[in-house]
Image (cartoon, rainbow, N blue to C red):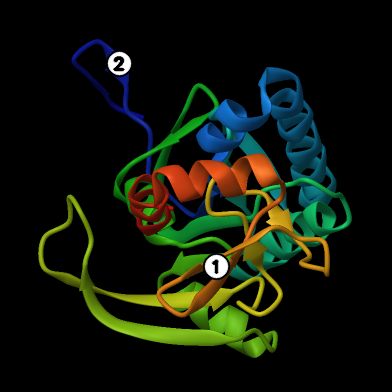
Amino acid sequence: MTRGHGRESVEPTQRTVMFLDLCRFTSLNDTHGDVMALEVIDRFTEAVHTSLTGRGRVVKTLGDGVLLELVSPAAAIAVADGVTRALHTVADMPELAGGISTGTVIERDGDVLGATVNLASRLADLAPAGELRVTGSTARAAADGGWQVEPLGPVPVRGFHGLLDVFTVVLCPADQCVVDPVCGMRISPGPATPTVQRDGTTLSFCSSDCADRFTTTPEQYLRQEDQR
């Protein structure tokens, strides 16, 4: 290794990295309180560690999200699927979204740095609830595994020059992922589920309190929905 500026330089290595986030966690915390928010984080963290076994490691936790290093793109998809399935077995959990990128990274003090990591973060920011935004190698691995993959074409990604080919991997189909637009909690609508009609669409809520909040200031929550 060579040295420069007083630090040991580290050779870049090829890695797959993934950011996974709990959607609308801040809104859930605001609506349902700190105790429930901590319970949600604990369940999420447990699901991540269980799904990671033999597939990679947690680089760091980021409050309502995690940065993971995986052994392959296929492993990343498997982990995201495992976490989604685990969250779907528990009531009152938010939906998952994430971004995956494969390329060179610099590993230092247990962290991973570089453009590949930055791209995975930006892709996660673009992903709506129940979906991943991924690059080509991950899209191919997902398609080979039978996942629903949709090409978005060349799209702008904040902080990156030019347009990048981005793909969607659907973790939870829209008809199975019904999310409260106020708190972000995943729900299974039934006869007693509070609903509100908006522009010809029926919106479902986890409670009458969330339905009332939406009715009072719908624009606030529709804007949040657009921003995940």
Q: Are the two marked residues, 1 and 2, in contact with CB atoms closer than 8 angstroms? A: no
Q: Position of residue 18 (x, y in %)?
A: 53, 52
Residue in the picture at 53% in, 85% down: 149
Which residue is labeled 1 in the image?
A: 131
Q: Residues within 10 Å of mark 2 (few under 14, many from 20)?
A: few
Q: Secondary structure at mark 2?
A: strand
134 and 222: which one is in front?
A: 222
Where, by quadrant of the figure, is residue 202 drawn?
bottom right
| Left or right, 72 with reference to 160 | right
37 and 64: which one is in front?
A: 37
Q: Residue furthest left?
A: 162
202 and 4: which one is in front?
A: 202
| Left or right, 226 with reference to 163 | right
Mark in front: 1 vs 2: 1
Which residue is labeled 2 in the image?
A: 7
Q: CA distance from mark 1 to mark 2?
A: 39 Å
Q: Position of residue 68 (x, y in %)?
A: 59, 44
Q: Position of residue 79 (x, y in %)?
A: 71, 58
Q: Position of residue 45 (x, y in %)?
A: 74, 36
Residue in the picture at 62% in, 53% down: 70
Whether residue 54 is visible to the viewer of this picture, yes or no, is no
Q: Residues within 10 Å of mark 1 (few under 14, many from 20)?
A: many
Q: Secondary structure at mark 1?
A: strand
Where, by quadrant of the figure, is residue 12 drawn?
top left
Q: Which amino acid type corresponds to the residue marked 2 in the rendered image?
A: Arg
Residue in the picture at 59% in, 87% down: 143
Q: Which amino acid type corresponds to the residue marked 1 in the rendered image?
A: Glu
Q: What count of labels does the image hold?
A: 2
Whether residue 64 is visible to the viewer of this picture, yes or no, is yes
Q: Residue furthest top?
A: 6
The quadrant the N terminus occupies is: top left
Vertical position of residue 142 compared to residue 195: above or below? below
